[in-house]
Amino acid sequence: MESVIEKKIFDVDEIRKDFPILSVESNGKPLVYFDNAATSQKPVSVINAISDYYKSYNANIHRGVYSISIKAGEAYENAKIKVKDFINAASEKEIIFTRGTTEAINLIAYSYGLEHVREGDEVIISEMEHHANIVPWQVLCEKKKAVLRVIPINDNGELLIDEYKKLLSLKTKIVAVCHISNSLGTINPVKEIIKLAKEKNKDIAVVIDGAQAVHHTKVDVRDLGADFYVFSSHKMYGPMGIGVLYGRARLLEAMPPYQTGGDMISSVTFAKTTYNDIPMKFEAGTPNVEGAVGLSAAIDYINSVGFDAIHKQESELLDHASEELGKITGLRIIGTAKEKTGVISFVAEGLNALDIGIMLDTNGVAVRTGQHCTEPLMDRFKVPGTVRASFAFYNTNEEIDVFVTALKKAVEILS
């Protein structure tokens, strides 16, 4: 089978051959996987890279002087260079591997936040944030007796930038917002958000949750001006259990360690411990080498497809799905922002989202139901939860038609 990595023209049928799970059946029907915002599927190149690591050079790194340990160490460090180039960081020293987006945000909140936020200071988040970008800041504010401010959104699911401007003050120490909403698909104007914060006070630290963004759009952290940018491998066609924290070097260097032990130390005596340089200062314990190998392969795969092709395909899927869902009586889409990626959340009048999800599953269609870890956002729209269909470039219009047909049948039966 010719790998899609060798191709220059986007062909969704060829793309799909690179994802083995897309050929399996679910409940006796071809799998239609529309839960990509929760986790993406993995191409053969990523699966093979992880398998090759375990078969050929599985070893702990940094202290081994034997050949496979050296090879594993090189693969781990090369993955950081790959990530650095992928988001255009200034140096691989600004790339810290974490367990995922959630741990990365917690690291910032505890290491940077506890050092810089004082009683009476303010932290700004938005109404559309994932719980992982709400709770760490709540805990920080409780510990430091600081105030959590929230940017409101309009009925389309767009941030009210004028209200954000009013929230910014000399008390603001941190702004933390998502690049793209996991529940609404809204693409936030993060470059403008960062610019406004810096105009108010250049020392405001801006944290961008890019978990839903890095696989949909080209991210340039230096162009954005972000102080911190975080994301997860498993949403961008890589393995679970590894994520990325990008931080400006000067900020990381001044921050205390988040966890201790292992490779984050420089020297240890019973009298005193000195810490390693960045990024190792923040990577205590045995690293997830296989995760780094898989993430590196995922970046290669994304680059081989190209963001222009990805954006074109996913935009067409969103347009087609929006049009077809709009024809179903009693269906209401939650999140209709002008700038939006391939996520559609909806409710059906009088019906439970969970029941709809179960009915869709009987037809092989995998969607996510519930609050999507955005309970305050659901409260904003006065719904207990939604059905969410989220698309990737390997999905097709034909799959959307299967989904819509199954949804109509589910609505008819449940009604």
Image (cartoon, rainbow, N blue to C red):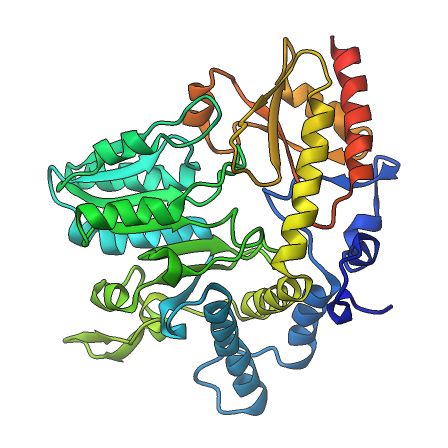
Asked whether 380 or 240 is in front, the reply is 380
Q: Give the quadrant of residue 333.
A: top right
Left or right: where 233 falls relative to 273: right
Up the image or down, 407 lies above or below 344; here it is above
- Residue under the point 25% across and 52% down: 205
Q: Where is residue 29 in the image (x, y as percent from the top left)?
A: 87, 36
Which residue is at 54% across, 27% downward?
Answer: 336
Residue 27: name its quadrant.
Answer: top right
**Which one is nearer the viewer's eye here, 66 or 170?**
170
Quadrant of the snapshot with the N terminus: bottom right
Quadrant for the C terminus in the image = top right
Residue 345 shown left or right of residue 168 in the figure: right
Residue 215 appears anywhere in the view: yes
Left or right side of 208 for 295: right
Q: Nearer the viewer, residue 41 or 380?
A: 380
Pinpoint residue 390: horizontal percent, then vertical percent.
64, 38
Looking at the picture, does residue 79 appear above or below residue 152? below
Q: In which quarter of the image is residue 239?
A: bottom right
Does any portion of residue 284 appear in the rendered image? no
Residue at the (23%, 62%) spot, across then down: 255
Task: Residue 413: give x, y in percent of width and height.
Answer: 79, 12
In the image, is residue 117 above or below residue 308?
Answer: above
Above or below for 20 versus 343: below
* Residue 396 in the figure: left or right of residue 392: right
